[in-house]
Image (cartoon, helix red, strand yellow):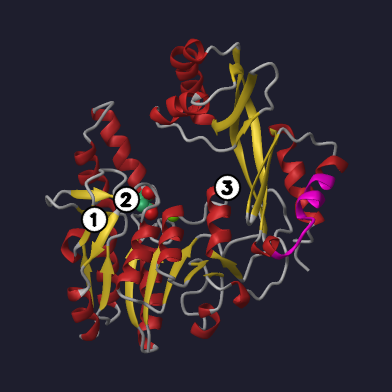
Amino acid sequence: MALIVHKYGGTSMGSTERIKNVAKRVAKWHDAGHQIVVVPSAMSGETNRLLGLAKEISAQPDPRELDMLASTGEQASVALLAMALQAIGKQAVSYAGWQVAIKTDSAHTKARIRSIDDTKVRQDLDAGKVVIITGFQGVDEQGNITTLGRGGSDTSAVAVAAALQAAECLIYTDVDGVYTTDPRVVSDARRLKTVTFEEMLEMASLGSKVLQIRSVEFAGNYKMPTRVLSSLTDPLMPLEEEAISGTLISFEEDTKMEQATITGIAFNRDETKITVLGVPDRPGIAYQILGAVADANIEVDMIIQNQSVDGKTDFTFTVPRGEYTKAMDVLNEKVKTHVGAASITGDAKVSKVSVVGVGMRSHVGIASQMFRTLSEEGINIQMISTSEIKISVLIDEKYMELAVRALHKAFGLESA
Ligand code: ASP
Ligand code: MG
């Protein structure tokens, strides 16, 4: 017998029919002797619908009230799931975040979990009940309802699993696992049986958006084995088969079954590149340029500073496409004259492609193989950045899919 947390996404909870299927699946696990806590999302489309209503009322709704509103989606789904379980003879009880309590800070619409009280949940589990807890929400010190940011139910589930020291957190979703790359770009992309949480962090932040990135950080910090698996399979499929399906996010590199050097090819289509030209090469300039961008809450990713010529240098960095105009405005208004830049240029149509894999730590020649592959396709590399387990290049967005396909093949990632 083990304590296991199940998380079901919006699609899995998308209709009363689907909620009944979730109940069947949960009952199957409970019948096998496990203690089960379920953390569901709102029914698909519900959070968007609620936030849409808010926008109809006000262009800038009060964040506290937004959380009050958005959290109702999950409250409806936990109650419906409890009823569905009771209807098939299971004892079940649902809780909103504040009832547990899941304590967060007060950063409305993007709150962070601080602590989770497991007392009530444990009592219910020991009494044989399935416990259902709202995803996405918590309560702050003052008793205000908070939410954890879009996709936050993943984080709720992993955090609840960590607080209860569960054996595993199963994230049921509408995909059947984590792939070597997006199967919409490479049709023979392969599902990974295991991925380390570090690789998953790199893949998630780079566009393989299967899980909210913060949930992966949580899984890493608390060493919570987390599995991503499909909720679209037959709910009554054999449990032993289901328990090893999907992709397991693991911690030990040596438990990795697949010994490939590279685990996946991640990409982000929506990048932009900005260059500040001809600034004096002296202390404080990088800080003045990038500090101003950071103060405007714009996330900077790749950064390079060129060799200086006659005491002048250039800075190039990337920002997400949605922030491009804002970043350009900040630079032109607040930075250009201040740092004495000659000019500021930009390219709003670039993409980032990365090869990711913990195997890189023990293998040489990955970068050169990557660069050779791109050169054979005639793709120009505009910027390069590396970490211990990732090499990223910035290229013209026109060639992004070509690059992903060529690299996927060059590193032998296709299905056998
Ligand atoms: N319902 C919330 C959202 O749509 C949280 C979640 O589904 O994870 O973002
Ligand atoms: Mg999600």
Q: Along the line of sight, which residue is nearer the eye, 122 or 77?
A: 122
Q: Which residues are magenta?
A: 362-373
**Where, quadrant-wise, is the N terminus in this rendering?**
bottom left
The label shown at residue 79 is none
Instruction: Name the chief secondary structure element in magenta.
Output: helix
**Where, quadrant-wise, is the C terminus in this rendering?**
bottom right
- What separation in Å lies between label 2 and label 3 (alpha carbons)? 20 Å
- Position of residue 41 relative to residue 162, above or below, is above
The residue under label 1 is: 138
The residue under label 2 is: 148
Q: Secondary structure at mark 2?
A: loop
* Residue shown at 33% from the left, 60% from the top: 156
**At label 1, which amino acid type do we have?**
Gly
Does residue 369 belong to the magenta stretch?
A: yes
Q: Along the line of sight, which residue is nearer the eye, 297 or 406?
A: 297
The label shown at residue 206 is 3
Residue that protrudes farthest toward the right in the picture: 376
Label 2 CB-ligand 1 distance < 8 A: yes
Q: Is residue 347 visible?
A: no
Would residue 28 appear left or right of 395 to someone viewing this image? left
- Position of residue 206 relative to residue 350, above or below, is below
Question: Which class describes the residues within 10 Å of circle 2: few (<14), some (14-19), or many (20+)?
Answer: many
* Residue shown at 84% from the left, 46% from the top: 372
- Discs 1, 2 touching: Cβ within 8 Å: yes
